[in-house]
């Protein structure tokens, strides 16, 4: 499933040059973005980056100051929320406390004037979908947080919207439940064949669930890509740092040799990079490398090994599956390296204040110019 990679595919939702101002504050700045039918799309960004505002404009609760939003080719301007083929699930769930689970799910259908028998059928189908059949008669306060979340979900898909908008859908759940529910949401989206647009500030959540992620900052799109691309090939320092943990070694290009680059780090360290992008020839850059791509060893690697730096274990964290090392280099810079404990050799144990050598392959990191 990768319609975005097909030049002939038509986007289902298009934000075209959208700007949204509140007074003289610009919440969304000339933003363009395409989402495809049946895509699970995540808007990811820190608090205040404008992600909820984007979602609210798609739902029709806010109108853009300029630009237009197209859904299935139709310009949404002026179309009220209830006439748009989208539905929104809020973080607060907004369940009616005095109504039972089934009444909550039936509410929107009743308002639409759906015949009683059909409502009963649809509610039963929804209860089954979210595995709440035996809770149909309970009130929201008699449910756990995860169950309430599923009622809200059932209610928002009961009307069969074409697009479901989810604003921090799992925000109220604890970590373990959130992780389980992420997979349930993905199954549900697949089974229903809906387009999901989810707002989250949690990068792991976006990485887990989404087909593609738009990373936003100050009302602008920083990158739109699949989770793997965002992690492996971030477009900028900002994206590299926002998603996962990264070491950013500032430096400048010392030489270009074919597709290889020699970089001189700000501290004087020499870094060899293979397969550097063609557009990088000279100037200031950052070398970005993830902790798991760095090897840390108590012994000096063999003569001729590229990209070796000596340092000292300054901090470490044992996380069960892996251990994270903070290695302080001679110039004071701290580099993070992680090692899977399953792969660790017993004689490779390192502890605080140990002398250590880090090394990494010439193709283990990427060069960033932004
Ligand atoms: P959060 O995760 O905290 O909800 P967000 O990325 O969803 O953040 P938005 O809710 O889209 O952010 O808000 C973007 C910016 O626009 C914020 O600085 C917010 O204060 C401002 N903003 C949003 N709605 C309004 C409004 N109705 N009036 C004035 N400013 C607003």
Image (cartoon, rainbow, N blue to C red):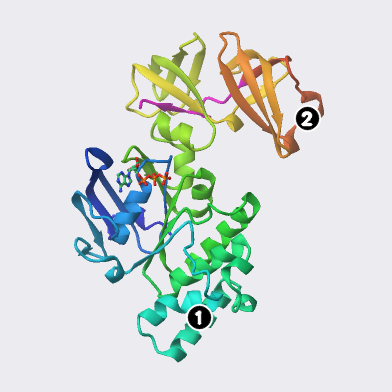
Which is nearer the eye, 342 or 67?
67
Whether residue 304 can be seen here? no
Q: Is residue 311 left or right of residue 227?
A: right
Would residue 362 be found to the left or right of residue 7 on screen?
Answer: right
In this view, which residue lies farthest toward the right?
Answer: 346
Decide if residue 117 is in sight here: yes
Q: Is residue 179 above or below residue 345?
A: below
Whole-percent x and y of residue 34? 30, 53
Q: Position of residue 67 (x, y in %)?
A: 19, 50
Residue occupying the point 41% across, 79% down: 109
148 lies above or below 320: below
Which residue is identified by label 2?
Answer: 345
Residue at left offset 40%, top offset 82%: 110
- Position of residue 102 relative to residue 272, above or below, is below
Would you say the beta carbon of the disc 2 residue lies within 8 angstroms of ligand 1?
Answer: no
Give the answer, above or below, for where 146 lies relative to 329: below
Secondary structure beneath label 1: helix
Quadrant of the rendering where the N terminus is positioned: bottom left
Q: Residue furthest front?
A: 98
Tell me the quarter of the image containing the C terminus.
top left
What is the crowding at mark 2: few (fewer than 14 residues within 10 Å), some, or many (at least 20)? few
Residue 30 % position (x, y): 23, 43
């Amino acid at each position: 499933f990768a319609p975005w990679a097909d030049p002939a595919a038509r986007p289902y939702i298009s934000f075209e040059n959208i700007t949204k101002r509140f007074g003289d504050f610009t919440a969304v700045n000339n933003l363009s973005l395409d989402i495809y039918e049946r895509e699970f799309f995540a808007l990811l960004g820190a608090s205040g980056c404008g992600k909820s505002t984007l979602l609210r404009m798609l739902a029709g609760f806010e109108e853009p100051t300029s630009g237009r939003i197209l859904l299935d080719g139709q310009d949404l301007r002026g179309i009220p929320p209830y006439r748009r083929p989208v539905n929104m699930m809020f973080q607060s769930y907004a369940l009616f406390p005095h109504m039972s689970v089934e009444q909550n799910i039936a509410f929107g259908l009743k308002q639409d004037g759906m015949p009683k028998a059909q409502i009963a059928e649809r509610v039963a189908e929804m209860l089954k979908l979210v595995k709440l059949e035996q809770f149909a008669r309970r009130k929201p306060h008699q449910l756990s947080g995860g169950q309430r979340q599923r009622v809200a979900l059932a209610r928002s898909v009961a009307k069969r919207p074409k697009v479901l908008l989810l604003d921090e859908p799992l925000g109220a759940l604890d970590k373990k439940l959130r992780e389980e529910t992420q997979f349930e949401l993905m199954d549900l989206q697949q089974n229903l064949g809906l387009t999901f647009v989810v707002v989250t500030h949690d990068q792991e959540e976006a990485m887990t669930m989404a087909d593609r992620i738009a990373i936003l900052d100050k009302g602008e799109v920083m990158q739109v890509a699949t989770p793997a691309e965002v992690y492996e090939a971030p477009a900028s320092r900002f994206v590299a740092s926002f998603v996962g943990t990264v070491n950013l070694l500032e430096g400048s290009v010392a030489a270009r040799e074919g597709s290889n680059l020699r970089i001189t780090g700000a501290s004087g360290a020499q870094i060899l990079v293979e397969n550097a992008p063609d557009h990088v020839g000279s100037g200031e850059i950052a070398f970005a490398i993830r902790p798991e791509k760095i090897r840390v060893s108590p012994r000096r690697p063999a003569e001729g090994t590229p990209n070796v730096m000596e340092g000292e274990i300054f901090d470490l964290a044992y996380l069960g599956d892996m251990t994270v090392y903070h290695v302080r280099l001679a110039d004071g810079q701290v580099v993070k390296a992680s090692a899977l404990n399953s792969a660790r050799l017993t004689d490779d144990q390192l502890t605080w204040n140990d002398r250590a050598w880090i090394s990494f392959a010439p193709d283990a990191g990427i060069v960033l110019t932004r």
